[in-house]
Image (cartoon, coloured by chain):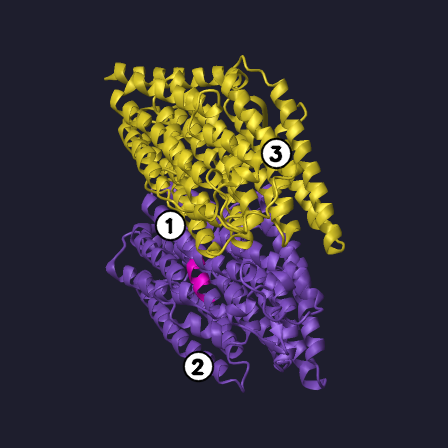
Chain colours: A purple, B yellow
Amino acid sequence: MILIKYLVPEVFLSLSIFSLLMIGVFVKNSFNLIYKLSIFLIFLLILIILNTDGETIKIFEESFVSDHFSLFAKLLILISSFFILIISKQYIVDIKNNKFEYPIIVLLSILGMFFMVSSNDLILFYLGLELQSLSLYILASMDRDNLKSSEAGIKYFVLSALSSGLLLYGCSLLYGFTGSTNFEVIASNTADSTIGIIFAMVFILVGLAFKVSAVPFHMWTPDVYEGSPTSVTSFFSVVPKIAGIVIFIRFMYLPFQEILDQWRYILVFISIASMILGAVAAIGQNNIKRLIAYSSIGHIGYAIAGMTPGTENGFKSTLIYISIYAVMNIGAFACIFLMKRNGKYIEDIQELSGASRNHPLMSLSLLIILFSLAGIPPMAGFFAKFYVFMAVVESGMFTLAAIGLVTTVVSAFYYIRIIKIMYFDDPKKPFEQLKDFGIYGSLIVSCIFLISFFLYPSILNEIISNISIF
Amino acid sequence: MNFPILSSITFLPLIGAFFIFLTRSEKNQSDKNSIYLSLFTSFTNFFLVLFLWYSFDPTTYDFQFVEETTWISGFIKFKFGIDGISILFILLTAFITPICIISCINSIKSRLKEFLIAILVLETFMIGVFCSLDLVIFYLFFEAGLIPMFLIIGIWGGARKVYSAFKFFLFTLLGSVLMLVAIIAIYWITGTTDVVDIYEIKIPKEFQYLLWLAFFSSFAVKLPMWPVHTWLPDAHVEAPTAGSVILAAILLKMGGYGFLRFSLGMFPLASEYFVPLIFALSVIAIIYTSLVALMQDDMKKLIAYSSVAHMGFVTMGIFTFNKQGIEGSMIQMLSHGLISAALFLCVGVLYDRTHSRLIKSYGGLVHILPKYSFVFMIFALGTLGLPGTSGFVGEFLVLVGTFKVNFLVAIIGSLGVILSAAYMLWLYKRVIFGKLEKVELKKIKDINLSESGILFVLAALVIFFGFYPDPFLETMRVSVDNLINNYNLEINRSIALK
């Protein structure tokens, strides 16, 4: 019974999901109620996590771990989901997607991520991953009457199932060669890296790279991002990425810590390929959701670059990167949710033309966010890249750093292209003036974070200073 | 801890910009308010900088007014400080900004408020560049300046503004990201990014060459040097007058300042090694871009190419590593800051009246614009380095310094002076002299009070420093001497090691 206290967030979340489901079944037209309750529950969970002390505890035969690392990841997941639920509410209502299941499935996927980031065992990891993924498939095809949405759901399901299969195959190989499903036992048995373990590592890497949509396993991302309802896309582009990167770090640094030399170069390749593809492929995009998809592929490349050194500075820089990335993307999607004209949401970038005349606040915010995404100082996005390249250069990988920084120049092109459209071009018809306090609030919060980050750039370092995996 | 005067002069424009951002009223009223606010901010800042210059102690080469706080804990300190070299650039920046603001009252018709915000934010970043004594802080300000300048060119620019803005942004960004790698590498080599500490620690020889090249890529684009100068004519032509003025007068000087402060100070051995490269590029810049300038039919483009040629003198002077050369290039940069700013303002005056920058649409202006022709002549003569103008002092000192080191380069460089006389006088002749034939020119009025105010002040300064450059030389002398001494010490040490 004493163990339960380390499981409070998960238990609380599960119970609230069940009760919300009950409310949904028995109360008619309960979308509004359940949506608000979910946001409130997430807020409560944030408070619970903030009040949990971060001592490292392993329970259930050491398969579930609660430490600073997992708590930070959960906090990040919750805060991002909190803001994303707030900014996407109006959209969900507008596209008549207001089914009460929506927030519940979001909560379910969060539950899956919770288990994933806390897992210290292959089985728990896989269960968490699948709970998350299954919820995400449903979310992708949430807009049932929309062909694109259904297509996105199916596409995501088929490809993701394939990658889960590979991942599972890797896990079984790993179990076969090390005789355990526990991460630490695996770590101590991989020292004499046999070819079998390397195979297992590669299979698992493929699965993980798919989940975070790193090149060359990124094909699903643009289609799914474009097809899914924007509310779901905003969720996809942030929250599962956080969970994926966190479990990625745990895998590389814990079970595979001994075979660093084997996975480092795979990661270097994945990272360079993602950075280049993210930079080049986004240039031709006219749909803002596709553009965000490619840009997020690029950003994942930078985040993975932070892991390649295999050092403590390395994974911490990745965590900082993914946190700042989450803030930037939430802001970007808040702007996308404001692009509404005649009751329809607009995804074509050209429609932003001259928006700075009619919507100065939104344009200024998007300007800040885009310069931040491009990594131009003094925005927070610069520091994200700065920390990553600090870690990369520390271990002597100058080529990776140089390629990474040159791709930032290429990607700067398409970010400033949007700025050009907003600020330099002639104005078109204005968008609707939405009176949604949530969207504006989130937008302003994220912009203030991005601008004022340079005043005290070590704030994130201090928050994650006591995280250790080893 | 004394009053943090450097932070104040750096962030005061930013605060002013924030207040302008907050003003809300009718369009005319808000334009007026923002002009007053920005003039107030920039003049206050200018007087603060004058006070700073007054209280600056020119007898020591140590960094003064140093401010230090932890910034990224354990990594990087936020460090500001100035010496005799940087204070002159700060002075120039604080002087040029109010001039820009006055000049744009007439010329900017739309979104004046945003324009003033951009100018003030840019001033913060520019002063920050010259104040910072930490590589990361320097990089932060150096890069951040791109954002307002990109917007200034893109929003208020001419017909091909988008192309020019993108070219400007991407060129400079590409140049400077390599510097970021170098800065991070320096951190891992020396354990610090504090410039003063790095001067002491001395970077090992084997790293110096690559790091020098990385810094060079950034400064060469910014300065700009041939062959990466192509963004400059485009940016100048399309930018609004105030944008061109800031670009020519201050942003280009960041490159020269970077060479002095970082390349020379931190990598003396590599600097010595790459002298032939710099000399070759400078000479090509002086001759080639002067020839290109001869062929231009757009006045702004002509001045832009002449800027590249003048920057060739600057790099040539810096890499002579002697007193005359370096002091000469400092004076050259400051005088170019005044003269090119004034020339762009002159072109802006004509452009506001006739909306043409082409040389062939003018001619015979002396008959209707006597005052204008007079000041324009002073600046034209300043550009070609007539004795008695500040342009002469700079070029003369640079050439003296170069003759000491390399006879051939100095000879070719001197030819550039003749070429600059050719294009400048020809430009002047075609625009000002001759018969007044164009009908549409007959209606235009001579420069008004605010225009003549700023132009005559600039002209007075150009002539004053032509006769009496001592205030500048006095301020920088000790710092430049120290720079050269350190350089020579390091070179002698490495020779002794061999």
Question: How far apart in space, not on screen, are marks 2 and 1 (Cα)?
Answer: 36 Å
**Callout 3–callout 2 Cβ contact below 8 Å:** no
- What residue sits 56% from the left and 56% below the top? A367
Host chain of mark 1: A
The residue type indicated by label 3 comes to Ile
Query: Badge 3 is on which residue?
Result: B454
Side of A209 relative to B238 (left or right): left
Which region shows up in magenta?
A: A293-300
The residue type indicated by label 1 comes to Val
Question: How far apart in space, not on screen, are marks 3 and 2 (Cα)?
Answer: 68 Å
Query: Badge 2 is on which residue?
Result: A154
Q: Which mark is residue A273?
A: none
- Dot 2 crowding, Cα within 10 Å, few <14, some 14–19, many 20+: some
Query: Badge 1 is on which residue?
Result: A406
Q: B389 or A65, which is in the foreground?
A: B389
Q: B426 or B47, which is in the foreground?
A: B426
**Measured along the vertical axis of the image, is residue A71 above or below residue A38?**
above
